[in-house]
Every structure is written in structure tokens, then in C-alpha cells.
Amino acid sequence: LGLLPLTHDLVPSKVSDLRHGTAEYTDELVDCIPDVLLAAMELIVSRHGEAKRTQSRAEMRGDRTAVAEIRAELRELSEAAQSLVTLSGMLQFPFADVSTKLVRLRVMLA
């Protein structure tokens, strides 16, 4: 869908797209963004955990190629998570708990 930015460079354009009153997205969709952000972050955290487990198994097997690929995926997941936190902050949701939950989930990736 391209609704959420998964890299830092996409955050500013998504912020302007998602502000109320723009023609890009309806207000009804924008109102759902906090829930969508939380769901997306939970998926990222889940995928990150799976990748870490896969990385451990690959390291035990001595599969350097797999380990390198998984490390790249982990970096991408970390960047996506940080992009969602940044988007949340820039959109300034009236619900502080959304940003707090996003940051807590982001910390789980460390």
C-alpha cells in the first residue's frame, strides 16, 4: 500500500501526505494511523525475533552467507521501526500512549 514509511528518507513525504486536510488520504484513513502504526511495529518486532533466532541457527551452522543476509534484514527492520517512531512524533498524535508504545516496541529490537 505504501501507507507507512519504512526508510528514513520517506518519512517527511509521508508526514505531509498523512496530515489532515490533504487530498492524498481521507480523514477516516488518517484517523486509523495510530492503530496501523502499532500493528506494523508489532509485526516488525515479531519478524525481528524470528530473524534473530534464524541468525543464531545460521551462526551455529557456520553459514556466513545466511548470517550476512539476516544481518541486513535486521538493519532494515530496525530502520523501519525507527521510521515509524519518527513518523509518529512528526504527526503529533493526540494520544501520547501511541508514541510511548511505539518507543517501547522499538527498544525491544535492541
Image (cartoon, grey):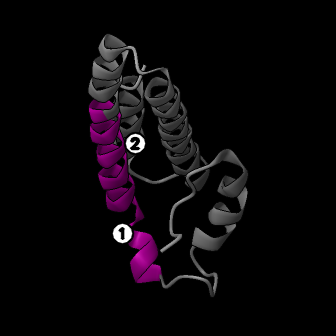
Asked if 55 appears above or below 75 in the picture, the reply is above
Name the image quarter holding residue 59.
top left
Q: Which quadrant does the C terminus fall into?
A: top left
12 left or right of 43 in image? right
Classify mark 1: helix, strand or loop. Answer: loop
Q: Amino acid at mark 1?
A: Cys
Report the residue at 36% width, 53% height from top.
40
- What residue range appears in magenta? 27-50
To which residue does mark 2 refer?
Answer: 96
Which disc number belongs to residue 32? 1
Q: Main secondary structure of the magenta part?
A: helix
Is residue 28 a member of the stretch shown in magenta?
yes
Label 1 packing within 10 angstroms: few (<14), some (14-19), many (20+): few
Q: Earlier in the sequence, mark 1 or mark 2?
A: 1
In the image, residue 36 lies at what x, y percent?
35, 61
Asked if 41 appears above or below 29 in the picture, the reply is above
Are the residues at dot 1 and dot 2 in contact (C-beta closer than 8 Å)?
Answer: no
Q: Amino acid at mark 2?
A: Ala
Report the residue at 30% width, 48% height from top.
43
In the image, residue 102 lies at what x, y percent?
39, 39
